[in-house]
Amino acid sequence: MSREELEKRFQEKIDAEIKIEPKDWMPERYRRNLIRQISQHAHSEVVGMLPEGNWITRAPTLRRKVALLAKVQDEAGHGLYLYSAAETLGISREEMIEQLLSGKAKYSSIFNYPTLTWADIGAIGWLVDGAAIMNQVMLTRTSYGPYARAMVRICKEESFHQRQGYEIMLTLARGTEVQRQMAQDALNRWWWPALMMFGPSDKDSVHTAESMKWKIKRKTNDELRQQFVDVTVPQAEYLGLTIPDPDLKWNEARGHYDFGEIDWEEFWRVVKGNGPCNHLRMKARREAHEKGAWVREAALAYAEKRRQRQQQKAS
Amino acid sequence: MTQQEALFQYLLRLGDNALILGQRLSEWCGHAPVLEQDIAITNLALDLIGQARNWLTLAGEVEGKGRNEDQLAYLRDARDFHNLLLVEQPNEDWAHTIVRQFLFDQFNYLLHNELQHSTDERVAAIAAKSLKEIKYHLKYSSEWMVRLGDGTEESHNRMQRALDALWRYSSEAFLTDEIDQLMAEAGIGPDLHKLEPLYHQYVAQVLDEATLQPPTDTYMQRGGKQGLHTEFLGYILAEMQFLQRAYPNMQW
């Protein structure tokens, strides 16, 4: 069968909503695009453990500590599912981690911002997980089977995390004046970075057209961003907090909120490595990897010794 | 000392062991040698903090002054904490973390195995629930003792160094005082002297399999149970209690 014929059949499957599975033929660009996207997603889960992990030892009550620990642990679990999903496309976890540590692979820029107060833990759950869910719900219907199935599991846990984050914000917003200010300050700092999570505007997004054609993505960055704003504004109102955007207002004609222009200069600065925490996040991941090397080597050596001993016993 | 006062202190020992070790383990979250172990060590932390909540809640009830788990965890200073010195020692590396865990788990297992038959039903219930988790912790840390002790030359050396460093904290649990005696007489807690040989027997067996040498002639440090700690505890509390101290009397 010619390449054209294969590609035609592939597109027919996509158009008929038939999932692509690991052993099916797929265009090389589809495979590469998916590896990029899934591994980037996996790295985001793992690097995303760091800003929230920053508050585990300082969580204000034991109930909050347990909830935060469990949440960050879930993210490690999500990282594992996603690395496994990417491995079905013919890349190993070691290679992906190597790409992360060398700076070749990206992760979500949102995790390059610092968590300065306890309210940031609420804001991350509410806004960052909230934004992630918009994207991930869409991805439960993505065309690649293993990725779609990983997303179904992840979405269930993410929506729980988001409620948890919102509940932290609600407690602070209804607490003392100091706590309310802490919550407002966190919203001020996390709002714009959360909007940036959806990526460049459609007109500047290099991957969107192809991803839409192959149904890797089903909504554009700007569509998802609008959806997020529409859902989140009433939630902020309920908290009695103010979204830091003077241009934000309901547009009756469009049936959506209008909102101000994102600072794209900041967006690209952080993507290019100059956010407040890029170097610290990478340093933390590299240190964990390097300091853990002897443990991983020892575990392999021991497994090999055991195998040899069992062989000797058997013979 | 009344039995009620002794029971309160005894419950703080149980709760503080779980809390402080859980706090230490939670420092690993996001930084463990491999993702699977990040999840596993966090599970241990979650179990231990869960156990601490049960013990501290009961301690507050026994004390009868209206203190809840958070007031006990966040508003006591180091001199009023009663955990073993062992559990407050720093993580250092994966070897120290595993050795500390193993030395504690075997004691904790033997202790809870007896506490599940406590004459105090509340104690028995918490112990029985915790015991399932602690059995798994012991299996986990024992396996890692062997894997790293008998792994590579580097892992072996690191484990031996960790064992040499932590061994001096391994027997504090069995040094009894008036509180232990009062609890044993009331049938609330076990006679710790009876558990000690079982502890050493199992530890020796695992060390042997791990090709590690038990240190000899080591003076056993003590004091944690009575509130005399190493310098590490103050920093653990400074970090853990920060928000409650900086913003008193607020709901979180």
Image (tube, coloured by chain):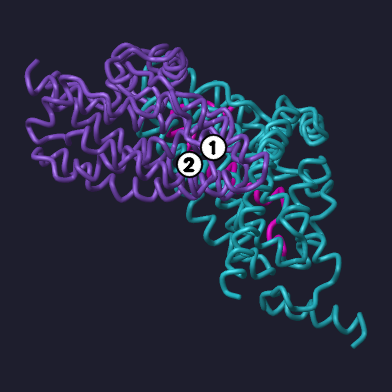
Chain colours: A cyan, B purple
Residue A51, quarter of picture: top right
Residue B42: which numbered mark, if any?
A: 2
- Our reading of the magenta stretch's main secondary structure is helix
Q: Write down the residue under mark 1.
A: B29
Residue B61 part of the magenta segment: no
Residue at image position (81%, 34%) is A268
Magenta stretch, residue numbers = A216-243
Rendered location of residue A251, percent (x, y) = 61, 41
Crowding at dot 1, Cα within 10 Å, few <14 / some 14-19 / many 20+, comes out as many
Dots 1, 2 in contact, CB < 8 A: yes
- Quarter in which the C terminus of chain B is drawn: top left
- Quarter in which the N terminus of chain B is drawn: top left
Rendered location of residue B146, percent (x, y) = 52, 48
Q: Is B149 in front, or is A187?
A: B149
**Image height of B59 relative to A210, above or below:** above
Residue at image position (81%, 40%) is A103
Which label's residue is closer to the chain start, 1 or 2? 1
